């Protein structure tokens, strides 16, 4: 099964066939748009009679795709919170052992951290970067993931590693199926460029190039939307994935000691609650002696926003159960997907709109 990709620069406003639009800058992040529909001559008034005109399908353009029936309804996920060193060979061997341990404990899906084969620094990214498309010796990290996914008959969402493609570097997550084949490759869309005076400054764009394609992939453990760390801050991405029928969102991430305590769990629970699906995250373990100190706290969140499993900051392998059968139950309990006001606002999936 192939990855379903959403392109980022495919929409002309002229292609939209509505009478009036209100552009809302603080709700927009390519490659998805929010529009508020207004008719200045016929203002929408709140009344009981207007409720009969609401069409929730119009809140998604094109209309949302129903979740497919997953190959597995109930399975175990393994979140491997790993220590990262400056020795790439050691990091790869360590990840191999962790994946094997998770599989031995029954995990059918294994998630690794962001930048698990390299120190997290702009100086390190060019040195540790791999040519994923070339594979083999040019990408020993992904070669290991491919081999283990096949030998262990598991799906691996391989955290992320620095990728070299031509003269560009990316922060890239690879998804491998049970046959060992690369099913999807997600390049981090939203680069981590922040400056909190006296706390933390990091500018990923000094070395990395932003990805251009959100990634949703059909796997042996369901339909998964992929984001990397800072991507989790953008609700539009998660909403696009939900509208494409995702069961689960996976975010390898390395939040820091400033934003981690404040936002890490909050954002995971928000993405899960807003979209009524599972959210899994995986962080590196904390190393207080490194130049970038990760918060840790890898977590699995359920479709009601409940924390199902988590850990602290040390190395750990979290094994938790995912049960997709409760997704429809939760959406029936709280039917927000049927209550959206398509007459007032809309999320536009640019690639799907153009493909139609």
Image (cartoon, rainbow, N blue to C red):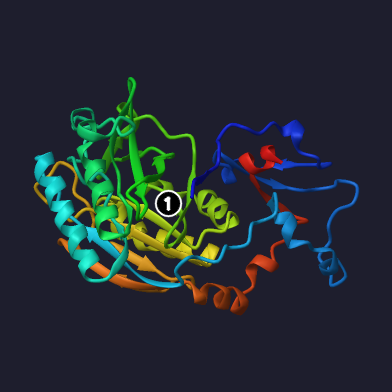
Q: Is residue 101 left or right of residue 355?
A: left
- x then y, percent, for residue 27: 58, 46
The answer, for residue 297, to whether it is visible in the render is no
Residue at the image point whose x is 22% and y is 41% from the top: 141
Q: Residue furthest right?
A: 41
Q: 179 and 259: which one is in front?
A: 179
Point 39% across, 40% down: residue: 188
Can you give x and y, in whole percent of width and height, for residue 8 in the image? Answer: 55, 35
* Residue 280 image offset from top left, x and y in percent: 37, 61
Task: Please state the horizontal and vertical placement of residue 39, each as a whole percent of the image.
Answer: 85, 47
How busy is the neighbourhood of tag 1: few (under 14 within 10 Å), some, or many (20 plus)?
Answer: many
Relative to 216, does residue 170 appear above or below in the rendering? above
What residue would you read off at disc 1? Answer: 232
Total number of numbered labels?
Answer: 1
Q: In what element is the residue under mark 1?
A: helix
Nearest the viewer among 14 and 322 is 322
Q: Residue at x 58, y 31 (%)?
A: 9
Point out the image quarter for the C terminus.
Answer: top right
Residue 26 is drawn in which quadrant? top right
Front residue of this view, candidates 162 and 346: 162
Residue furthest to the top: 167
The answer, for residue 241, to whether it is visible in the render is yes
Position of residue 184 in the picture relative to residue 100 (left or right): right
Query: 219 above or below 39?
Result: below
Q: Nearer the viewer, residue 128 or 18?
A: 128
């Amino acid at each position: 099964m192939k990855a379903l990709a959403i392109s980022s620069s495919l929409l002309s406003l002229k292609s939209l066939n509505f009478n009036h639009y209100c552009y809302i800058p603080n709700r927009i992040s390519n490659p998805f748009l929010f529009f508020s529909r207004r008719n200045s001559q016929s203002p929408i008034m709140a009344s009981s009679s207007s409720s009969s005109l609401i069409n929730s399908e119009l809140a998604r353009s094109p209309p949302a795709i129903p979740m497919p029936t997953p190959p597995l309804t109930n399975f175990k996920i393994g979140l491997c919170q790993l220590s990262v060193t400056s020795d790439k060979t050691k990091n790869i061997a360590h990840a191999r052992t962790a994946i094997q341990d998770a599989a031995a404990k029954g995990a059918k899906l294994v998630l690794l951290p962001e930048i698990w084969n390299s120190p997290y620094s702009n100086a390190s990214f060019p040195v540790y970067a791999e040519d994923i498309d070339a594979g083999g010796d040019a990408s020993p990290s992904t070669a290991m993931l491919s081999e283990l996914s096949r030998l262990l008959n598991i799906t691996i969402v391989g955290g992320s590693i620095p990728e070299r493609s031509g003269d560009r570097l990316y922060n890239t997550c690879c998804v491998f199926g049970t046959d060992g084949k690369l099913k999807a490759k997600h390049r981090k869309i939203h680069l981590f460029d922040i400056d909190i005076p006296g706390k933390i400054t990091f500018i990923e764009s000094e070395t990395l190039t932003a990805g251009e394609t959100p990634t949703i992939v059909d796997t042996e453990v369901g339909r998964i939307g992929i984001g990397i760390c800072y991507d989790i801050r953008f609700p539009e991405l998660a909403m696009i994935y939900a509208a494409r029928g995702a069961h689960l969102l996976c975010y390898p991430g390395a939040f820091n000691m400033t934003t981690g305590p404040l936002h890490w769990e909050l954002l995971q629970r928000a993405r899960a609650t807003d979209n009524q699906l599972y959210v899994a995250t995986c962080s590196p373990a904390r190393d207080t002696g490194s130049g970038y100190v990760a918060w840790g706290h890898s977590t699995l969140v359920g479709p009601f926003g409940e924390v199902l499993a988590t850990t602290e900051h040390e190395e750990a392998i979290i094994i938790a159960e995912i049960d997709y059968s409760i997704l429809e139950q939760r959406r029936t309990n709280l039917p927000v997907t049927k209550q959206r006001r398509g007459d007032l606002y809309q999320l536009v999936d640019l690639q799907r709109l153009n493909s139609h």
